[in-house]
Amino acid sequence: PFGELEAFTTSGGLSTLPQSMGHKVENMDYKTIRFPGHGALMRSFLDLGLFDREPRTLSDGSQVVPRQVLGELIERTCDYPEADSVLLRIVAQGTKNNVPLIVRTQIIDRFDKENGITAMMRMTGYPTAIIASLIARGEIAERGVVPGERCVPMEHFRTELKARDVQLEEFVKVLE
């Protein structure tokens, strides 16, 4: 439903999974999807030093922080579509009770026009708010930096996402 997209390897929310799950995770890819050309564009910005946070002195003696300049230029010139989308897909292959399975879990979230909340706001803010409320209610007892896969009660988390109209779908296929 979104046309052509590109995927490239990034790090992110599940980056602790291989360490947390030890031998249970043999292979993991974490990819970001964007419009075609996005990865090359970001790579060009990186190669030019436009993500650098340290001030640089220009030929006229003035100083600029490349990352700050890039951010301001993007804000001024880029037209962000109001109706954004977030696509999340997790595909796991393994065995459960000695039955070989592929499990695919996905979320396709869209801009909430009624409340004026972008999909990106929803998919970053809602999980954060859910986890904060779980901590406040004592439903997450661990303290400090703890990977989510080790401490977040998933069924409760899923229920809270659904209460916020985030549609999480799961598909299970038994392998022959």
Image: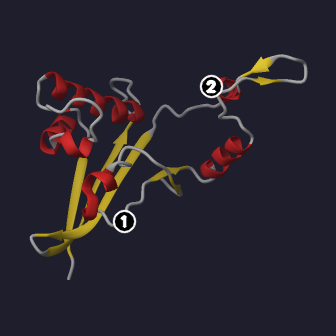
Vertical position of residue 173 compared to residue 165: above or below: below
| Quadrant location of the N terminus in the rendered image | bottom left
Q: Nearer the viewer, mark 1 or mark 2?
A: 1
Q: Amino acid at mark 2?
A: Glu
Q: Is residue 152 visible?
A: yes
Q: Disc 2 marks which residue?
A: 75
- Residue 103 location, quadrant: bottom left
Residue that sits furthest to the right in the current view:
60
Tag 1 secondary structure: loop
Residue that sits furthest to the left in the current view:
97
Disc 2 residue crowd, few under 14, some 14–19, many 20+, Cα 10 Å: few
Tag 2 secondary structure: helix
Earlier sequence position, callout 1 versus callout 2:
1
List x then y, in percent, for residue 134.
16, 29
List x then y, in percent, for residue 28.
38, 61
36 to the left or right of 18: right
Disc 1 residue crowd, few under 14, some 14–19, many 20+, Cα 10 Å: few
Q: Amino acid at mark 1?
A: Asn
- Rendered image: mark on residue 27: 1
- Rendered image: mark on residue 60: none
List x then y, in percent, for residue 60.
90, 19
Nearest the viewer among 106 and 91 is 91
**Residue at 24% from the left image edge and 46% from the top image edge:** 149
**Residue at 42% from the left image edge and 59% from the top image edge:** 29
List x then y, in percent, for residue 73.
69, 26
| Quadrant location of the C terminus in the rendered image | bottom left
Residue that sits furthest to the top in the current view:
62
Q: Is residue 167 visible?
A: no
Q: How many marks?
A: 2
Vertical position of residue 149 compared to residue 114: above or below: below
